[in-house]
Image (spheres, rainbow, N blue to C red):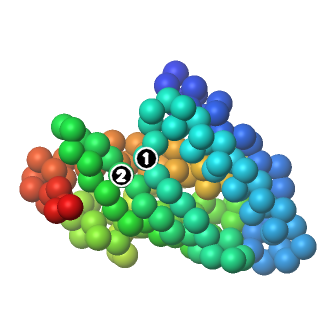
Amino acid sequence: MVDAATRKSLSSIPLLTTKAGPRDKELWPTRVKEEYKALIEYVQKNKDNDNDWFRLESNSDGTRWFGKCWYIHELIKYEFDIEFDIPVTYPTTSPEIAIPELDGKTAKMYRGGKICTSDHFKPLWARNVVKFGIAHAMALGLGPWLAVEIPDLVSKGLVTEKAR
């Protein structure tokens, strides 16, 4: 189900070990530290491989995340704001990543600009609860979604290059 390129990408993301969500006041800070460590390693590997494509940061308690992602199509960079909240049932439930400015432009999106990951990513997340985290959601959820949807939206004229 997962191709060799995806396996290679996944191997660069550390697996997480702390089963804690935002409601778990004692273990949640430990989980957030693991999340940041995994994200930092993933972003660094992406930079090393000339594949840098997102930036993320969180609020002080690690329950709300926001940043930017970008996709280069035909030598044009398309950049978008991203945001998501950590579900109270995390890590059992994956985060729903949103790109608000694309809301309503594609059928593969829910209200509020949340990207659709139900068919491919959510079953994989369910099999890897605790081990997968935000970096995995970016690599296996947002990354493939951008690769499929952005070229299609560009070809339909629904996404255009932003003036600099």
Q: Residue furthest front?
A: 164
- Estimate the x, y position of residue 36 in percent, counting from the top left: 69, 56
- Residue that appears at 19% across and 37% down: 74
Q: Is residue 130 visible?
A: no
Q: Which residue is mark 1?
A: 53
Q: Is residue 101 left or right of residue 156?
A: right
Badge 2 vs badge 1, beta-carbon distance below 8 Å: yes
Label 2, on which residue? 70
| Residue at (71, 60) in percent of width and height | 91
- Type of amino acid at the residue the image marks with label 1: Trp
Q: Which element type, helix, strand or loop, lies under badge 1?
A: loop
- In the image, 91 versus 9, the foreground residue is 9
Numbered circle sitting on residue 22: none
Structural crowding at the residue carrying mark 1, measured as other residues with C-alpha within 10 Å and reported as few (<14), some (14–19) or many (≥20): some
Tally of numbered discs: 2
Camera-side residue of 14 and 129? 14
Q: Secondary structure at mark 2?
A: strand
